[in-house]
Image: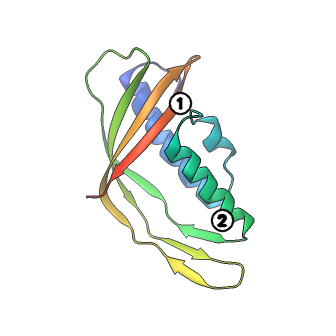
Amino acid sequence: MAEKTAKGAEEFVRYFWAVQNYAYATLDVEILNKVSDHSCSFCKATARNISSLRDTGTDVSGSRVHVLSISIPPAEIETGIIVGAVINQESAKLTRADGTTSTSAPLSKAQSFVSLNWERGRWLVADVAIEEG
């Protein structure tokens, strides 16, 4: 994952979605914060949401992101790159401490665009945009 190549960027984006899955499953944002640039608004919002779920005693099931395909532009990587991916996301079931539940709608074949920065010999997520299909 520490390769400044198109393949390295692809592998890192797959890793990033796995980290997000882990963060929601465990309600632990430590690794998510380590792979995110301090300016990543998507990452900050995700970490805040996960921390809020943890702090309120809310259990999360489902919500896993599955990467269906990845597309990387054929370009020389200087300081960063935007990696496009088609993803599915399972619906999430939230169970609150009081026993009430809610369910989110799944995403099917959504376009994700993950902006990566190469800093100090590693990739960091600069931001993420998702367009529902």
Name the foreground residue: 131 vs 92.
Answer: 131
Q: Are marks 1 and 2 in contact (CB under 8 Å)?
A: no
Q: Is residue 21 left or right of residue 99?
A: left
Q: Which residue is mark 2?
A: 53
**In the picture shown, does residue 104 fall above or below 76?**
below
Q: Amino acid at mark 2?
A: Leu
**In the picture shown, does residue 30 fall above or below 115?**
below
Secondary element under disc 2, as helix, strand or loop, is: helix
Task: Residue 76 in the image: state x and y as whole percent.
Answer: 32, 15
**In the picture shown, does residue 118 fall above or below 116?**
above
Q: Crowdedness of circle 2 by 10 Å Cα count: few (<14), some, many (20+)?
A: some
Indicate the quadrant containing the C terminus: top left, top right, bottom left or bottom right.
bottom left
For image coordinates 61% across by 43% down, the residue present is: 32
For image coordinates 41% across by 34% down, the residue present is: 115
For image coordinates 40% across by 33% down, the residue present is: 10
Q: Amino acid at mark 1?
A: Leu
Q: Is residue 106 left or right of residue 49?
A: left
Dividing the picture into quadrants, the one containing residue 79 is top left
For image coordinates 66% across by 49% down, the residue present is: 29
Residue 124 is marked as 1
For marks 1 and 2 on the same chain, the one whose residue lies earlier in the sequence: 2
Name the foreground residue: 50 vs 5.
Answer: 50
**How far apart are the alpha carbons under marks 1 and 2?**
25 Å
Secondary element under disc 1, as helix, strand or loop, is: strand
Task: Residue 13 in the image: state x and y as whole percent.
Answer: 44, 38
Residue 87 is marked as none
Task: Residue 78 in the image: state x and y as whole percent.
Answer: 40, 14
Dividing the picture into quadrants, the one containing residue 52 is bottom right
